[in-house]
Image (cartoon, helix red, strand yellow):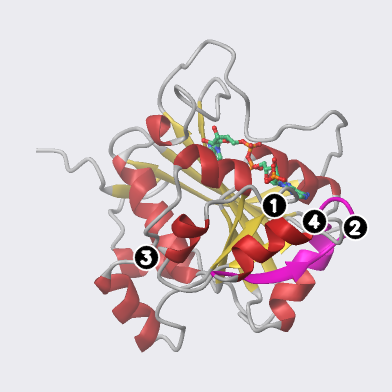
Amino acid sequence: MVNASEIHTLMAGASLTDEQLLASYSVADRSVPWLRANFISSIDGAATHEGTSGGLGTDADGRVFALLRRLADVIVVGAGTVRQEGYRNLALDDEAVAWRTANGLSAQPPFAVVSASLRLEPNDLASYATRPFIITTESASEQARARVEKVAEIIIAGDTSVDTVELKHALAERGYPQLHSEGGPTLFATMIAEGVVDELCLTLSPRLEGGSARRIVDAAEATPQDMALAQALSGADGTLLLRYVRAAR
Ligand SMILES: NC(=O)c1ccc[n+]([C@@H]2O[C@H](COP(=O)([O-])OP(=O)(O)OC[C@H]3O[C@@H](n4cnc5c(N)ncnc54)[C@H](OP(=O)(O)O)[C@@H]3O)[C@@H](O)[C@H]2O)c1
């Protein structure tokens, strides 16, 4: 019987263990700031199914998604994704915590939520395993700030919208150089435009979605950046797990 979460290299067809997967997604030097973005898309380019990415998910994607969280110093996410996907009670499982601790990482990586409006639910933020960061702007309302400040640490990065160069710098400065971004398309657009994306882990879900779903980036202007394929894995369920890194200039 086929194990749906089994993952093979495209070339050799060997099934990879979690340790092998973790090693394959590890960076050479964790002290160098690095922003990894992670997305899933249908093969016809849809980033959502009925409004969330979860509907595109596969077993192989779920497995790698969890392993990538395990490797992060901090998990960055836009407020739209937090609201739409209902981010609450966020915690890595016991196996991940044991692995992180054994590898010299904090037990749980904090989340860093990017928001200009600060339209975030304090009770949800308080339910995360560690006190989150909220990355916002100079112009955020004092009142909204006071609401979330009780449950989160505020970082100001930009005047009216969050500058992702400042975001990356501010998190590295606080001891979180390995950034794992879970999107979504609005935040990713800014990251691409501001040139901070070092890596994209893109899962292709083996389905045609049709319809008018958004893609993984949502921007008015094109800001092209060449990327190099660093790894391509395939799940037994037909999922493709692609890892692209910034192309050498
Ligand atoms: N396919 C995938 O892998 C994937 C991954 C993630 C999300 N998604 C999907 O994407 C959809 C959400 O899209 P989205 O574009 O709303 O996601 P998003 O980028 O997570 O959220 C957008 C919101 O984040 C804040 N934000 C983003 N960039 C900002 C910046 N530079 N400065 C200040 N605030 C910033 C703003 O929040 P405020 O409004 O609070 O100011 C903005 O309204 C959901 O349906 C989700 O399921 C798909």
Q: Nearer the viewer, mark 4 or mark 3?
A: 4
Residue ID for mark 3:
91
Task: Check residue 224 for magenta coloring.
Answer: no
Task: Compare marks 3 and 2 and give the one earlier in the sequence.
Answer: 3
Write down the residue under mark 1.
Answer: 115
User: Which residue in the structure is indicated by mark 4?
Assistant: 140
Which residue occupies the extreme top position in the image? Answer: 211
Q: What is the spatial separation of the Cα atoms under label 1 and label 3, in whole angstroms? A: 21 Å
Q: CA distance from mark 3 to mark 2?
A: 31 Å
Mark before the other along the chain sequence, 4 or 1: 1
Magenta residues, start to end: 151-167
What kind of residue is marked 3?
Answer: Ala
> Disc 1 vs disc 3: Cβ atoms closer than 8 Å?
no
Q: Residue 32: x percent and y percent? A: 70, 78
Position of residue 216 measured from the top left corner of the image (x, y, whole percent): 63, 35
Identify the mark nearer the N-term, 1 or 3: 3
Mark-to-mark CA distance, 2 and 1:
12 Å
At 64% from the left and 47% from the top, the residue drawn is 119
